Image (cartoon, rainbow, N blue to C red):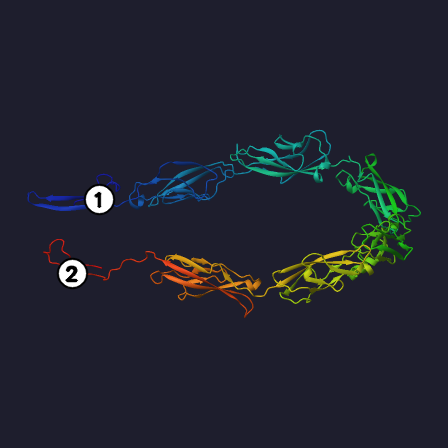
Amino acid sequence: DIRMRVAMPLDYEHIRSYSFSLYANESMSDHVGFARVFIELINENDNRPIFSKPLYNISLPENTAPGTSLLRILATDADAGTFGIVRYYFSDDPDQFSLDEETGWVILQASLDYELMRRFTLTVLARDGGGEETTGRIRVNVLDVNDNAPLFQKEAYVGSLRENEQAVQPVARLRATDEDSPPNNFLTYTIISASAFPSYFSIIMVEGYAVISVTRPLDYEQVPSGMIHLEVMVKDGGSPALNSTVPVTVEVIDENDNPPEFSKSSYIVKIPENINAGATVLLVNATDLDASREFGQASLIYSLEGSSQFRLNSRSGEITTTALLDRELKSEYILIVRAVDGGVGPQQKTGIATVNITILDINDNAPVWRDEPYHANVVEMSPINTDVISVLALDPDNGENGTVVYSISPENPFYTINSSTGKIRTSGVTLDRESSNPRDAILMRTIIISAVDRGSPQLRASASTTVFVNLLDLNDNDPKFLNLPFVAEVPEGLAIGSSVFKVQVEDPDYDKNGLITMALQMGMPRLDFYLNTSTGVLTSTSVLDRQIGLYYLRIIAYDAGNFPRTSTSTLTVKVLDVNDETPTFDPRVYNVSLKESIPRDHVVARLACSDNDAGLNAELSYFITGGNQDGKFSVGFRDGIVRTVVGLDRETQAAYTLIVEAIDNGPAGSRRTGTATVFVEVQDVNDNRPIFLQNSYETSVLESVPQGTSILQVE
């Protein structure tokens, strides 16, 4: 029985298997036995995990973001295989941290707060695959960050003081705290805004408090609503610094240091005598610069002295009547009003004003006409401001109520009236007795006057009065030609004694001023005509010929007034033409040479033709009546200009003889025609290339032909 024993401790981590041979031999050398031995070691968990450090120490700011990997712990195990695989665990799971069991990374899970926990000590376990454990420690130091703003102990602060205080007055104490550690929690205080008097306030530290003081006297009346609103800021020592603000309300207490003052020292009021009893006469108003309800406007009480006819509302300052007033009994009242404030005893202050009330007259009488009806004579054509007549209306009222205002109603453009005196004058618009406008004729002869006083409301006379105007005639109208100036047309050759025209004339003046006589003005050619001085009929005294085409006759008309008025006009007698002249070309023959290369619309000749007739009889139209069979030329219908219509070709036609006619525009059946001839020579231009008689030529030549032999002739 052969036994194998372990000679020394075996270590799987160093040698995992052994193999060797056993020999058994007898005394005879060739008798040997052989065996091969293989030994495999079985692994045991004989090593514990060992941390790389007995204590892991780390510091991090409190604002480190969750999810941040902080540090990696490491433990080693000498065992091989699964016994040497190490996993990591916290001995108790902390809320703020997590541990990756495979890698050993410690990760921040939740936000840190230096003010709540400044240090964490964590116990970690390293466990191998066989269950062996080793304990380690992690120390996490939390570093302070300036993440807490300073906070005031109150949401708002209130202070108060009296106005006009002379000494420095503390009005409020403030305090703020900051949970951060030094130097982040070192605090400074500042007044950053004030609704009024910002320079009057200071802030200093006294025994850990920020004390706000007023350094100068305040005036309550200059402080809106008696309240000053401050805003104070506290700032910590961090970088960057954090701050907070808090409102501070300072109440200024009013003192009765201002007397009431009326808006006027003296009020002057005018009221009508028919004002109702109890009606408001005046609203007096006193102001007190003290702004509190105790001493200011709300505390004022009014009183009245002077007459029982008036009453004063002690709060509103409204003065009203207590009875009906009569201006004829008393026309003026003088009252005294007082205003007292809310002060007590010697502290009470008073304001005084006077009220002067004048009673006004009432307009209760209308104007009344005197000395009507009114009649006046006015010569027509009278100049502006000619006196016509004066009217008068009386009003017994006083002042404006008794002042009468006159006016022309409805409006009359021919006359004006002095609104105060009632004197009527001409306006300057022409007074024409002969006016044909019926409305103007009435307005010139009738003036309607109304009267109204200046009272309020105005009173009008019960009826208007009428001024009847008799217009006296003047010889103020020139004879007027009704149908002159005029152009009378007569045909030439008119017989002697024929009526040519009847002149019509009128004069609207009265009697002899409107009686008219007519005459022809002396001078040539009046001998060809005769004018009847009364009827105005114009007749011919000779046969008319268009050699004198126009007669200008001056006709005179005059009336029979003492100072006769005259008018002159013109009658134009036009002798009408007869188509008795033939159009005549000058010259009658035109010779023109043109190159065949001229463009279309080229001017060939400008024909000159005249007709001694007039009007349509002398209006000419041009036509080419011969020599233009192929239509290469045209003539202007009105201007007689001969032009080419298309290009010319000398090789086709080298000369043209054109016959041009001019026809006048006389009456159909009596039109006359003139004729002209235009000879056109077309001059050659080198506009054709040489052309071979054949498109191609062909011949044969012996190769032995001598030089200079004629081969072929082309043409």
Residue at which label 2 appears: 699
Q: Which is nearer the eye, 136 or 47?
A: 136
Residue at which label 1 appears: 17
* Neighbourhood count class around disc 1 (C-alpha, 10 Å): few under 14, some 14–19, many 20 upward: few
Q: Secondary structure at mark 1?
A: strand
Q: CA distance from mark 1 to mark 2?
A: 121 Å
Residue 27: quadrant of the picture = top left
Tell me: residue 462, above or below residue 398.
Answer: below
Q: Residue furthest bottom?
A: 669
Q: Which is nearer the eye, 471 or 258?
A: 471
| Residue 274 placement (x, y as % from top left) | 88, 51
Q: Amino acid at mark 1?
A: Ser
Residue 111 is tagged as none
Mark in the foreground, 1 or 2 = 2
* Neighbourhood count class around disc 2 (C-alpha, 10 Å): few under 14, some 14–19, many 20 upward: few
Q: Secondary structure at mark 2?
A: loop
Q: Is residue 348 found left or right of 77 in the rendered image?
A: right
Residue 457 visible in the shown view: no
Q: Amino acid at mark 2?
A: Thr
Residue 155: quadrant of the picture = top right
| Residue at image location 17% in from the left, 61% down from the top | 698
